[in-house]
Amino acid sequence: MSEASWTVVDEYVSSHLLKADAALAEALLNNSENNLPPIDVSPVQGKMLMLLAQLAGARHILEIGTLGGYSTIWLARALPADGKLVTLEVDRKHARVAAENLERAGLADKVDIKVGPAKDSLAAMPAGDPFDFVFIDADKQGNIHYVEQAIRLGRSGTTVIVDNVVREGAIVDEGNDDPRVIGTRKLFEYVSSHPKLNATAIQTVGSKGWDGFLLARVA
Ligand code: SAM
């Protein structure tokens, strides 16, 4: 099986289980017109995130790594009427495009885009109103710090998802010293030994290639 076949299967799944969606299509078009890299989650992954957030009963969601807000739209749609999502983005242009896309999707009032390095935004966030669901999809070298912050800002039962933890299998290629791969290996070590985390990871193939999600529950 090749990426082309995975893409055809993704399209099959989408054609059966995902409805045509103007807001999401326009968001991807706007991202492309603004030259944002096409590194958003795929449609089927976005819907999976939305369903997981709904299954978790999430009312307060944290996202680290907004890009143009494609995954943000999916996640914000999981929220109840009074729910809120905070998303962190370092790049001003990405944040501006995301704001446009969220406005067009009718979700601007539910989403707070904090612009700046996620580390700084997280440091400024008090632990009072815990997040129920955290999606981590920014710089991979920062992942351990982001998981630590997800625990600090979460509660018992918070769901934490980290994207891109397989990287075409590079995590098991000992000769690969890409900092993102090293960061991901360190993340597995950190999560495996953390007393407050119960986790697994699942490999994914599809229109975005071969990768995977790490899923953890905070004890
Ligand atoms: N979650 C998005 C989606 O699926 O639509 C994709 C996010 S993209 C993979 C990663 C984003 O993280 C980029 O927009 C990048 O600018 C942002 N980013 C990278 N390093 C960051 C940092 N230190 N703090 C905040 N955002 C960062």
Image (spheres, rainbow, N blue to C red):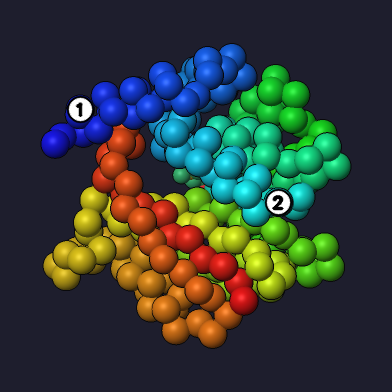
Between circles 2 and 1, the one closer to the viewer is 2
Where does residue 213 sit, x and y in percent of width and height?
Answer: 41, 54
| Residue 138 seen | no
Judging by the rendered image, the residue that carries numbered circle 2 is 57
Query: Alpha carbon of mark 2 to alpha carbon of mark 1: how far?
Result: 35 Å
The answer to which of 42 and 56 lies nearer the viewer is 56
Quadrant hosting residue 190: bottom left
Q: Is residue 198 visible?
A: yes
Which label's residue is closer to the chain start, 2 or 1? 1
> Helix, strand, or loop for circle 2?
loop
Q: Is residue 98 above or below residue 19?
A: below
Image point 83% across, 37% down: which residue? 81
Looking at the picture, tell me which residue is in the foreground, 12 or 187. Answer: 12
Image point (38%, 78%), residue name: 189
Q: Amino acid at mark 2?
A: Gly
Please indicate whether residue 69 sits to the left or right of residue 14 in the image: right
Which residue is depicted at the point 61% across and 19% down?
23
SS class, disc 1: helix
Q: Quadrant of the N terminus?
A: top left
Question: Is the distance from the Cβ of mark 2 to the nearest ligand 1 atom less than 8 Å?
Answer: no
